[in-house]
Structure formats: structure tokens, C-alpha cells
């Protein structure tokens, strides 16, 4: 699908962010914890972009099917 790469990258960034956030909490490293939270937010946004791309692709196919 059109948004597969974005969704995959988003999943990776969210997982990476979770690890960084946990490591930051465990070591009292506020910068690492904040970086992890930022990565998780970025991952969520990338996954949302992927879903929007998929929806747009599906809508385009529906219109093309209706016109043919």
C-alpha cells in the first residue's frame, strides 16, 4: 500500500522511543527520556501519515473503478 513505508518507520520510531524513554527513566537521564518521548511522538505522526496515504490511495482506486 501507499503508506506502508511510513507506517513501518513509525512503528520503528515508536519502539526506539520506548526503549530510550525507559533507559532515561532507569538512569535518571532526563535528556534521554525526553528524546524517547520525542521519538514516540514522531513515530505516531509517521504512522498517521501512512494511514492517510492508504486512505487516499483507496479513494483514488474507488473513483477509478467507478469511472471505468
Image: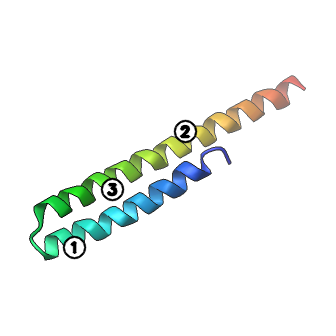
Q: Is residue 15 left or right of residue 28?
A: right
Query: If the image is split into quadrants, where does the C terminus sit?
Result: top right
Q: Look at discs 3 and 2 and give the one toward the viewer.
A: 3
Labelled disc at residue 40: 3
| Residue drawn at the location 39% of the way across and 66% of the way down | 15
Instruction: Answer with mark 3 or mark 2, whichever residue precedes in sequence.
Output: 3
Residue sitting farthest toward the bottom: 26
* Looking at the image, residue 64 lies above or below residue 43: above
Residue 2: quarter of image: top right
Q: Is residue 16 left or right of residue 54?
A: left
* Looking at the image, residue 10 lies above or below residue 20: above
Q: Are marks 1 and 2 in contact (CB under 8 Å)?
A: no
Q: Are marks 3 and 2 in contact (CB under 8 Å)?
A: no
Residue sitting farthest toward the top: 67
Measured from the top left, where is residue 51 in percent x and y?
55, 44
Q: Nearer the viewer, residue 68 or 43?
A: 43
Q: Is residue 9 left or right of residue 5?
A: left
The Cα–Cα distance between marks 3 and 2, rounded to whole angstroms, is: 19 Å
Q: Which residue is mark 2?
A: 52
Q: Are marks 1 and 3 in contact (CB under 8 Å)?
A: no
User: Please, what secondary structure does the residue beneath circle 2 have?
Assistant: helix
Measured from the top left, where is residue 22 in percent x and y?
23, 71
| Residue drawn at the location 55% of the way across and 38% of the way down | 52
Labelled disc at residue 23: 1
Instruction: Answer with mark 1 or mark 3, whichever residue precedes in sequence.
Output: 1
| Disc 1 packing (10 Å; few <14; some 14–19; many ≥20) | some
Instruction: Answer with mark 1 or mark 2, whichever residue precedes in sequence.
Output: 1
* Looking at the image, residue 40 lies above or below residue 50: below
| Disc 2 packing (10 Å; few <14; some 14–19; many ≥20) | some
Q: Look at discs 1 and 2 and give the one toward the viewer.
A: 1
Amino acid at each position: 500500500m501507499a503508506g506502508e513505508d511510513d507506517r513501518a518507520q513509525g512503528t520503528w520510531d515508536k519502539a526506539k522511543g520506548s526503549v530510550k524513554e525507559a533507559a532515561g527513566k532507569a538512569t535518571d537521564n532526563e535528556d534521554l527520556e525526553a528524546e524517547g518521548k520525542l521519538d514516540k511522538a514522531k513515530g505516531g505522526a509517521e504512522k498517521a501519515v501512512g494511514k492517510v496515504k492508504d486512505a487516499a490511495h483507496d479513494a483514488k482506486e474507488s473513483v477509478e473503478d467507478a469511472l471505468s
